[in-house]
Amino acid sequence: MPDAYILGIESSCDETAAAVVRSGEQLISNVVASQIATHQPYGGVVPELASREHLRAIVPVVRQALADAKHTYDSVDAIAVTQGPGLAGALLVGIVYAKALAFALGKPLIAVNHLEGHIHAVLLEERQKGNHELQFPVLALVVSGGHTHLYLASQNGDAWSYENIGHTRDDAAGEAFDKVAKLLGLGYPGGPVIDRLAPHGDPHSVKFPPAQIKHRDRRGRADGRTVKPDDDRPRFDFSYSGIKTAVLRYVESHQMQAAVEARRKALANISKPKLDDYLLHCDKLTLDLVASFQRAMIEDLVGKTLAAAEAYDIATLFVTGGVAANQELRRTFEREGAKQGLPVFFPSRPLSTDNAAMIAAAAYPKFLARDFAPMDFSAEAGMALK
């Protein structure tokens, strides 16, 4: 099989990204233009601003990815782009540009599910290390600002398929991290800040009760199929709106509002706060709350994922997505996975967050199967992974 160089394009949320990957197993270039500075004043991603920033960045980012890879538009074999899930306006910027390139160059166009991309970020880096043999069944936890999903992943030839066995009923884990950070005046994005501050507090000082999920998900399953009353296969759903509310109640009951507002104003005047800046403006009560919140989140994620691994007799576990960059989450998964004799694989931190290398890698099996997208396909903001 001759090498195939695929140009990947990713614009599902607030990062404009392009990459060139060879045959799904070698990263040739990877360029990401972040929009953090644009959205920081608002404490979260503003969809309209995200779309405008993608429009500004998409052409130079793709050109840089090709230049870094020492490729041209003509020398790549196919163009891959994220179809969904994500912000509709943001997705459309990448899709329209990818369509224009494919049409003008006469190249195959491949539509990729963003969630599958996160799973293939792990596969890409394992193949780069020479690890081509995976033990099945494989369970993948995709955990990020917009998603918390558990998938059973299967491979049939070169093609991959997925069955969802758990998803969040409300907030995604990364969303909970960001909202709690915003609530405590720690700025945006909140996940990395909480990760850095948590070791400076007592993780057992605040007791957060585990989420209670007592009924089936009436919205149906995350893979688009309805849960039938006689479907007795175990599910492992998540819920993080409750812990977010518990943090709010704690702030109110301990009269922390004035300190939060002072911290918010102080950090807003520092363009790029360092750890010492955060620590200077955080008292012990805040640090203990941050550490306890992170501990509760990680215990829930790890506990439910490893319970699912045991229930489905899993041989290999992937943990991927933006929250997979959390240092304590990685350490806990590695420690607890080892107790079960379960190998746990993560992407590197640069490939944990949104990027286009994962999109180009996930496109390779579709390239081999000649599973190309028609020119009239569009963005799917709520796209399911199957």
Image: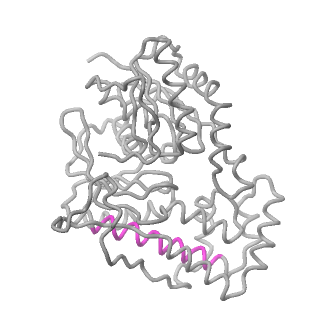
Q: Position of residue 308 (x, y in %)?
A: 27, 65
Q: Position of residue 275 (x, y in %)?
A: 70, 62
Q: Residue 62 occupies which quadrant of the picture?
A: top right
Q: Is residue 53 left or right of residue 328?
A: right
* 305 lies above or below 359: below
User: What's the residue at 59%, 78% (across, down)?
Assistant: 247
User: What's the residue at 61%, 83% (across, down)?
Assistant: 249
Give the residues in magenta.
Answer: 287-307
The secondary structure that dominates the magenta segment is helix
Please identify the quadrant where the C terminus is shown.
top left
Q: Position of residue 349 (x, y in %)?
A: 51, 48
User: What's the residue at 50%, 24% (across, down)?
Assistant: 98
Q: Residue 131 occupies which quadrant of the picture?
A: top left
User: What's the residue at 58%, 60% (across, down)?
Assistant: 191
Q: Is residue 7 left or right of residue 372?
A: right
* 294 lies above or below 94: below
**Colour scheme used in the picture?**
one colour
* 288 lies above or below 253: above
Q: Position of residue 242 (x, y in %)?
A: 50, 76
Q: Is residue 60 left or right of residue 77?
A: right
Task: Depth check: give the residue in front, 120 or 178.
Answer: 178
Q: Residue 260 occupies which quadrant of the picture?
A: bottom right
Please identify the quadrant where the N terminus is shown.
top left
Q: Magenta stretch: residue 111 in it?
A: no
Badge count: 0
* 14 lies above or below 330: above
Task: Depth check: give the residue in front, 225 or 323.
Answer: 225
Q: Magenta stretch: residue 292 in it?
A: yes
